[in-house]
Image (cartoon, rainbow, N blue to C red):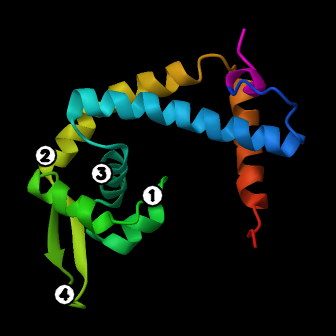
Amino acid sequence: MAKTIEQELKQTRPIRSPQEQAVLGLMRTSRAVEESWRSYLKRNESISVSQYNILRILRGARPHAIKSSDIADRMIYRDPDVTRLVDRMSKQGLVSREEDPQDRRVVLVRITDAGLALLDRLDEPVHRHVHAVMAGLSPDRLRELCRLLDEVRGGIRPFP
């Protein structure tokens, strides 16, 4: 049986509200899912989750190149230095950079054949990972979870 968030965090006092319990559960779950994927990527491909995310964004934009700022807007986990990541990935041959013909100050980024080959290798492990992570939920429960998560994201208000 799964541990409660209180058990995982070894709480000695009750969590103050269902909202706090839910937020702690979301954060802890997100971290656990990310850590298992991070470990796999580091061990097998020597890339970070952010680099993987950038490659997926660029594959989705194909055949077009896109601005670094557009990459940053689409990332699951915000990384303050997309430019540094793109530079590293360019040196690895996973992406290429080019000048925007409309605005020479803008750099466009495109996935290379090597980047596509890396994603092709990772497609099956991604499939296995997400299925392993969600193995405890039925299709109906997964749809309900997705609906609830959409509601949570849609209801987030700025915090002063």
Q: Residue at x 14, y 59 (%)?
A: 90
User: Residue beneath label 1, please?
Assistant: 75
Amino acid type of disc 2?
A: Ala
Can residue 63 be seen? Answer: no
Q: Amino acid at mark 4?
A: Pro
| Residue position for label 4 | 101
Q: Which mark is residue 127?
A: none
**Amino acid type, mark 1:** Met
- The answer to whether residue 6 is seen in the rendering is yes
Element class at badge 3: helix
Q: Which mark is residue 114?
A: 2
Q: Position of residue 22 (x, y in %)?
A: 78, 39
Per the rendered image, the range of residues in magenta is 1-8
Work out whether residue 69 or residue 6 is closer to the camera in this orientation and state it. Answer: 6
Find the distance from the CA under tag 1 to the CA under tag 3.
Answer: 10 Å
- Residues at marks 3 and 4, CA–CA distance in whole angstroms: 23 Å
Compared to residue 17, the image places residue 57 above or below, namely: below
Whichever of callouts 1 and 3 sits on the residue coming sooner in the sequence is 3
Answer with left or right where residue 101 lies relative to residue 148: left
Residue at position x 24%, y 74% in the image = 108
Q: Disc 1 on helix, strand or loop?
A: loop
